[in-house]
Amino acid sequence: MPFRFFSVLLLVLTLSPTQAADRVSLKQTKKALTLMRGKTPILTYHVATVPPPKGVDRVFDRSGFIHPMHAPAGGVVTGIHPNDHYHHLGLWHAWVKTEYNGQKGPDFWNLKARTGRVRHAGIKAVRAAGFTVAQEQVAYLDGTDIEPTVILAETLAVDAAFVKSANVIDYVLAQKNVSTKPLIFPAYRYGGGIAYRGPLSWNKTNSDYLTSKGLNRTNSHTSRARWVAMFGPTEKDGGKAATVAILCHPKNHDAPQRIRTWDNGKVFFNYVPVQETGWSIKPGETVTLRYRLVILDGQVNAKTLEARWKTYAKQN
């Protein structure tokens, strides 16, 4: 038999049950890409359009986002279609306040405005523990009855690993302005390269934020942070606690970026590269934003997260 067959057979036979259970794999269907750790899901990316709840305006149809996302024990740590913001979709991204061709807009975030949106545009590559997809931020420059104009062509790479008892997810977004005009981002309080909505059951009594500066939900909004952790009960097994930390790479524009958090008890988070100073992407220009998610069971302390950020910061 070929040597390669023996090598693969030897690898399978030498894997311990624990190693096999922690190996990350990819499951692909026509509708979604799901990363698994053994038999436990890590995250699902939606290739197909997902509708909002029954009876809600179909303007909130959306593809190209991640939900559910899971803690290592399997509990769900994202929320989707909350009735206060139907356009919140687990883990996603979009620009909000823009100027284009001398006009205000488009708004790619607030779907109800009907001026723009983000959509899945194709699968570029799949790997044993990740995938790369094409997405588009499109503008309805001539009305919603006309095919929208692609302003930003995106390449989103998502890769997962199981490291020191955590689901570690790298989220790398490259955006190229494929239009003929600059896309300008005036300074604004939210929008950018990554956004997160926590489980809809999280509230003031069972969840909170913790930033790299030691701030929480009462005082963290508009601060700068190398990392931000959010924690609360998962939507499984009686609500065991879990932590979702989002790390900002030091090479990102305006790093450590300012953040948007809420103090009303619900958990929403956004790294905002333009919260203090405006930015733009010129025609033909590509910008890249890098983030890492670290998801652990239980409530995790600052020392542990700071160590993980330092490891991440050393990577290109």
Image (cartoon, rainbow, N blue to C red):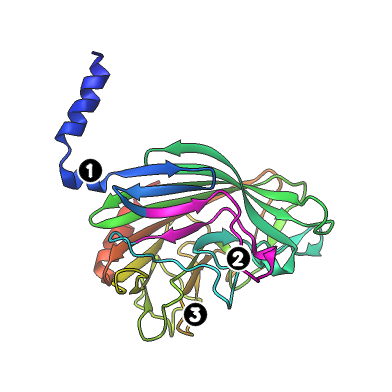
* Residue beneath disc 1: 20
Q: Is residue 115 above or below residue 138?
A: below
Residue shown at 49% from the left, 78% from the top: 221
Give the mark nearest the N terminus, 2 or 3: 2
Q: Which amino acid does label 3 sit on?
A: Trp
Q: Position of residue 91 (x, y in %)?
A: 49, 61
| Residue 252 appears left or right of 83 | left
Q: Distance between the residues labelled 2 and 1?
A: 37 Å
User: In the rendered picture of this protein, how many numbered marks are placed on residues?
Assistant: 3
Secondary element under disc 1, as helix, strand or loop, is helix
Could you tell me if residue 194 is visible in this image?
Answer: no
| Residue 200 appears left or right of 101 | left
Instruction: Report the mark closest to the observer, 3 or 1.
Output: 1
Judging depth in this view, the residue of 135 and 316 nearest the camera is 135
Q: What residue type is labelled 2?
A: Pro
Give the mark nearest the N terminus, 2 or 1: 1
Query: Magenta stretch?
Result: 42-70
* Residue beneath disc 2: 52
Label 2 Cα neighbours within 10 Å, binned few <14 / some 14-19 / many ≥20: some
Judging depth in this view, the residue of 99 and 70 nearest the camera is 70
* Residue beneath disc 3: 262
